[in-house]
Image (cartoon, rainbow, N blue to C red):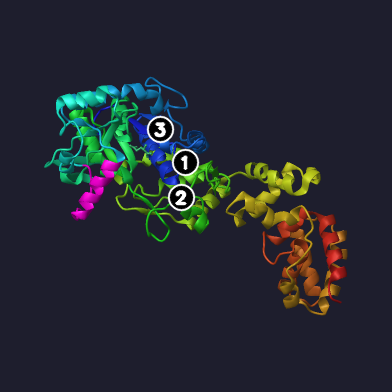
Amino acid sequence: MSDRQVRVRFAPSPTGALHIGGVRTALYNYLFAKKHNGTFILRIEDTDQTRFVPGAEQYIADALAWLGISADEGVVNGGPHAPYRQSERKLMYREFAQRLVDSGNAYYAFDTTEELEAMRKRLEAAKVAAPQYNAISRSSMKNSLTLSEDETKRKLEAGEPYVVRIKIPRNEEVRFHDIIRGWVVVHTSSLDDKVLFKSDGMPTYHLANVVDDFLMNISHVIRGEEWLPSAPLHVLLYRYLGWENVMPQFAHLPLLLRPDGNGKLSKRDGDRLGFPVFPLDWQDPVSGEWSSGYREGGYFPDAVINLLALLGWHPGDNRELFTKEELVEAFSLEKVHKSGAKFDPDKARWFNQQYLRMRTNAELAMLFKVDIDKKLGSSANKWTIEYIEKVCHLIKEKAHFVKEFWDIGSFFFIAPDKCDESVIQKRWKDTVPGFFAKTVDIFASLSDFTAHNVEATFKKTAEESGIQPGSVMQLLRVILTGMSAGPALFETIELLGKDEVVNRIKKATEMLPK
Ligand code: GLU
């Protein structure tokens, strides 16, 4: 790598909720900056006012804050290149559009929407595969290349609406190096004369993006593959503005694909296939449509960081679990894959499970307590946080998310009101009621009610009654928990405590078939 100071930016447009593909772009920029002691910038590209969505910028800031992808400079904390919102930089761009016109690399175009439409139809009729405003068609349109200088001047002075278009050379090769893809060569005959600037004074994305990357001294442009087709145009802009020697290096990241590998992971796939594709819940302010987020889905932010980091990058060994610091240490753009990364919802859940297991019981108890309070209201107060911690210890192995804890372990707080009948039917024998009546009395008289002692006592009682302990153990579990499977039985019993266990068995034996 050159010794240029690393300065990278994440430059989303506030057009809706930030897709996880965008979050991954932000993450790779962040990791790259941290790895090279560089600067990570958050810039908002809001020049297209027609696509502006209220709340979207705040959403982006909240999502990055939740994940701890914090920018060193940008819309949230300012910095030496403020403002970082392009609409607030509006006055800076005109000069550069003018420079491009003056040097003959851009031109004014006055075509109306109807005239553009007529051109498209004409080209379609002539069987042109992709009708474009380009090096060929521009010669028959209304622009400063076809109009006289006087006519152009008159139109501009009269305030006729115009756009500034780049003048793409007719027959050239544009070559640039992409860190992930290697050399990219594009022939200018496939490029169109994109609009750079409009008479309302607003630049388009292409001009604003290049100008800001230059003014903010960006060293590397790390962004999604969907921007690769725009890169040759950007290279030409750097050249025409005389900035080729400080042009950033490009790295275009692979697409995130649907779980079946068929196409790009889209906004709608998540809720359709049952997993989030957004970091936080989002309600579209116009359509009212809800999309679910990782945060509200119960994911831990460090699990999301870990799973996103591995969607398109791997250091090459067999590690899967990385802290953020380890990711910074291991990250390199050279190890980012070229091909699309399939999103795997089961793997996403697996990551959360791993992070859940790494949480202390105390942390989990604080989270679980919120649900317990909701379920039990004021009667939740009788459970101490120490008790909830012990419950977490017993049930956490069974869960992917804290929100599953209640379903797995509600019996630690309230006696089950129904039980798995199939177990009763399968395990039922005439000797059972007598056995449990005896067990209740023995349990009630035990002074040492620890898991170990209860287990030994239970087995001994079964054997003395001529019953296989295994055949009554599952019944005991169902009686106490309502379920046929769950956490370690005798540890559960110890935690429930003698009184509760005795009560539950008594109640159940009253109801058991005689
Ligand atoms: N504003 C563009 C976007 O929404 C940024 C593309 C780039 O990083 O150059 O993704």
Q: Position of residue 482 (x, y in %)?
A: 74, 64
CB under 8 Å between discs 1 and 2: yes
Q: Position of residue 11 (x, y in %)?
A: 38, 34
Q: Visible in this render: residue 242? A: no
User: What element does badge 3 sit on?
Assistant: loop
Q: Is residue 261 left or right of 359 when viewed as pictured?
A: left
What is the crowding at mark 3: few (fewer than 14 residues within 10 Å), some, or many (at least 20)? Answer: many
Quadrant hosting residue 178: top left
User: Separation of disc 3 and disc 1 at Cα?
Assistant: 12 Å
Quadrant hosting residue 471: bottom right
Q: Amino acid at mark 2?
A: Lys
Residue furthest toward the top? 80
Q: Compared to 93, does 183 lie above or below?
A: below
Mark 2, residue position: 267
Quarter of the picture containing the N terminus is: top left
Q: Which residues are magenta?
A: 114-133
Q: Is residue 400 left or right of 459 when viewed as pictured?
A: left
